[in-house]
Amino acid sequence: METDIDRVAAALPAYEVGGELGHGGWGVVLAGQHRALGRPVAIKQLPPAFATDPAIRRRFTAEGRLLASLDHPHVVPVYDFVEHDGLCLLVMELLPGGTVWNRFTRTGFNAHAAVAVALACAAGLTAAHNRSILHRDIKPENLLFAASGAIKVTDFGIAKVIGGNETLATKAGDVLGTPSYIAPEQARGGELTPATDVYALATMLYELLAGELPFPAADDAMALLFMHAFDDPTPLQETAPAVPDSIADVVMRGLATDPTLRYPSAEAFGIALACASTGRWGPGWLTTEGIPVMGADTIVSATGLGPPHTPTMTDGDEHPPLPLTRPHAAPRRPVPGSPGTESHRADPAATTDPTATADPTAPTASPDVTAPGSRATEPPPTVRPSITVHARGARLADVSGADLVNVRTVVKLPSPRIPLLIAAALAVITVLVALLGLGSPPIDVPPIGAVTVAGADPAGGAPVPLDLTAPIPVTVAGAGLADAATLALDVLDIPVKNTDAAPLINQGGAAAATLPPLGGQYFVAGTLTGTLTLLQAGQVLETWTFPVRTTQLATTTAAAVGLAALALFAVAYLESFLRSLRRGRGRITGIIGATVTAGVLGAVIVGALWILTARPPTTTTVVVCAAVAAGAGAAAAIGAARIGRRRRYRRTHRNTRSAGTTTDQR
């Protein structure tokens, strides 16, 4: 590390570089002091593995120049930025007051202070949004206290420096940043707007007011991302019923899953929050906590400390507040989050004691009895968090560029609708092919009048009627050298019944034979293909094929029973595989099993229609139906797997909620 400090010192000759303050989620933070001005600074260094990337260096220079021009009382100023010799360094103001999270865990906030923190953050974000700068990682750990008590937002633009316009995650599903505050569109890899920062700000205010997050803690980082991406947060009135409804409405609208339903900007959110708070606590409430709100006239005015401000459509308030869906429910507590935090601040007191725990006797909130419009004379009770550290996402210092992908690739829930529609279409095609048939069985009928079988001429085109239990008379005109005949019944070119050869006896220019009964009327019957073979001394002289229809019903045969049983087994197994996939289990085996069983079911459909409609099947029909049905099964399996993936993470969400409720009851 000495070598790195030496390199940093060489890149910043105007500064005296001190020791390491900590490791943040985005890199190392060093202490420093301007040699001429004597001004203490914090020096943030991006990990070398990323600082050597030309694209990151270009974005670092562009963002550094933009951040250095951002001057606002609620934004940590960037004094300098340096891209030199494989190093990317940001020189920032060093703040001694610690973070909002440190103070929240140590002493807690009452509702007045919590709202004041949110308003100060909204004011800083407004200045950034007006310069087209998104923060993308708002959280209490990124809000610092100046010596004056003012809140300042830090770490603007770092996410964009690393990922450009993409939200990055590791291939294992750990998002860069803090998953507890990630907006739905951010978790899904969608387009980011100022409403993205509004979501994180509303999440932070929710936690400061309730002592817990809108979503329960989860051991699986992917489950937490899916909660934010696809689920609705728990209403604030359910976790903190004493929070005034007007304030809770503002918070919950800021947490809308659809970004178009949120406040479109931090300014609009701040104005709505200030109006709701002032309407509940009176115009003097903000002065009671020592947390000033500056640099945003519209927000300050809405608190009653400036010229009157009436929210209008120009504030972006185009949507009515979202209703509280489950008000007045019993409070609950989630399971505490897994250990892990970050420390990269100047003051040693800013480091959270890892053994510290929330005071179980601390009240979460109480009704504020101040009448609307009057001055609040007594602050609400203090709230402290139910956890001491947040679930941490991936840190740049712990990963390489090869480990990072667009979050869309790991948190992707493609709709099951398309594969299910494909499955339905292929199933319809399977039935149509089975009904219409492809091709026809091979037929090579004898010349007209050359042969009669059971008294019928096969050359007529109509199926020859056969009684499987009776002898079969055969007459051959001009048999020539043939001395014997045999008859076989075929299905899909496969002989399923054969008679023994019977001698042909000349009878006045023709030869006649009586073939023994084919028998087995309970094995197979119906419409088949007959093959008549003439023999001479055991050698085949002539072969003719023609359609045959037995007088016995096909539905009473073992073939029909076997097909019915096979159909039942195929349907049962297919349903079992799809059910398992819908529940989020057995993805690979389920897709393979569903594909195979659906293919079998397609072949069974051909057989069933052969028995029921007396249409002889062809090999082509069976193969095509099996293949198309297998495709339908695969598509249905993919759709079921997509449903299962969504249900799996929602089930994790529900189980975590249940565990939190149980813990709270204990």
Image (spheres, rainbow, N blue to C red):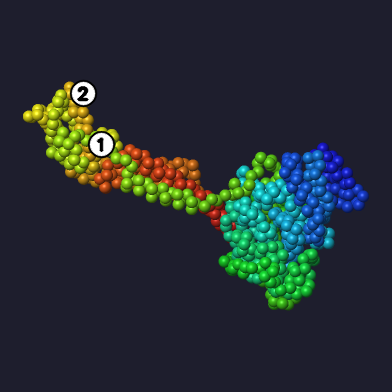
Q: Residue at x 69, y 65 (%)?
A: 269
The C terminus, quarter of image: bottom right
Residue 506 in view, yes or no: yes
Q: Amino acid at mark 1?
A: Ile
The N terminus, quarter of image: top right
Percent position (x, y) of residue 553?
21, 45
Label 2: how many residues lie within 10 Å, few (<14), some (14-19) or many (20+)?
few
The front one of 426 and 649 is: 426
The front one of 589 and 620 is: 620
Of the residues under marks 2 and 1, which one precedes in the sequence?
1
> Of helix, strand and loop, which one carries label 1?
loop
Percent position (x, y) of residue 232?
58, 60
In space, the residues marked 2 and 1 are separated at their CA atoms by 22 Å
Residue 151, placed above or below residue 220: below
Q: Is the C-beta separation of discs 2 and 1 under 8 Å?
A: no
Residue 428 relative to residue 191: left or right: left
User: Badge 2 is on which residue?
Assistant: 539
Q: Residue at x 78, y 44 (%)?
A: 88
Percent position (x, y) of residue 130?
74, 60
Residue 251 relative to residue 48: left or right: left
Q: Residue at x 80, y 44 (%)?
A: 83
Q: Which mark is residue 190?
A: none
Q: Residue at x 64, y 58 (%)?
A: 213
